[in-house]
Image (spheres, grey):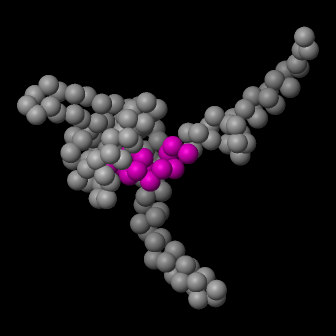
Amino acid sequence: MATETAAQRRDGARAAYNAYLAACPARELLDTISDKWVSLILNALSDGPLRYSDLGRVIAGISQKMLTQTLRGMERDGLVSRTVTPSVPVRVDYALTELGRGLQPVMLAIKTWAESNIERVHGARQAYDSRS
């Protein structure tokens, strides 16, 4: 059995979490958080917990199926918590976990940047399309 030096172990650990590599576990997480529905749900929950139905109203264009799938994935990843209150009808609330709250400032910054720069992007697209 070959032994590794401390430097080789460090290099191996660095490579294991290099998102530019296809096999990197962090790349899977980047795929998740770059999903538009995940980013919108994270931002919608930034002011506190919301009921499932409220999330559906706040996020225009999301289907019930996509909202359910996205919330399940986010719960599985530890980004949101789901609380069921037995009542008639059943009340289901979603809130950011500590992990989700840690990601929220980054997602809010991206949302703010997108809202502030969409006009410039549209202008760049028009200029590009007119050259083609």
**Which sits in the foreground, 63 or 49?**
63
In-image side of 121 versus 13 (left or right): left
Q: Range of the magenta residues?
A: 31-44
Q: For the image shown, how many numbered marks are present on the structure?
A: 0
Q: Which residue is painted at 31% across and 59% down in the image? A: 61
The quadrant holding residue 21 is top right
Q: Quadrant of the C terminus?
A: bottom right
In this rendering, is residue 61 above or below 85?
Answer: below
Which residue occupies the extreme front position in the image?
65
Q: Which residue is painted at 32% across and 45% down in the image? A: 65
**Which sits in the foreground, 52 or 39?**
52
Residue 16 x/y as whole percent: 72, 32
Residue 4 x/y as whole percent: 88, 19
Prevailing secondary structure of the magenta residues? helix
**Which sits in the foreground, 54 or 99?**
54
In this rendering, is residue 61 above or below 106?
Answer: below
Q: Which residue is painted at 46% across and 38% down in the image? A: 102
In this rendering, is residue 123 above or below 36?
Answer: below
Confirm whether the magenta stretch covers residue 42: yes
**Which sits in the foreground, 88 or 127?**
88
The quadrant holding residue 86 is top left
Q: Quadrant of the N terminus?
A: top right
Residue 128 x/y as whole percent: 61, 82
Q: Which residue is painted at 21% across and 47% down in the image? A: 54
Which residue occupies the extreme bottom position in the image?
130
Which residue occupies the extreme left position in the image?
88
In-image side of 29 versus 79 (left or right): right
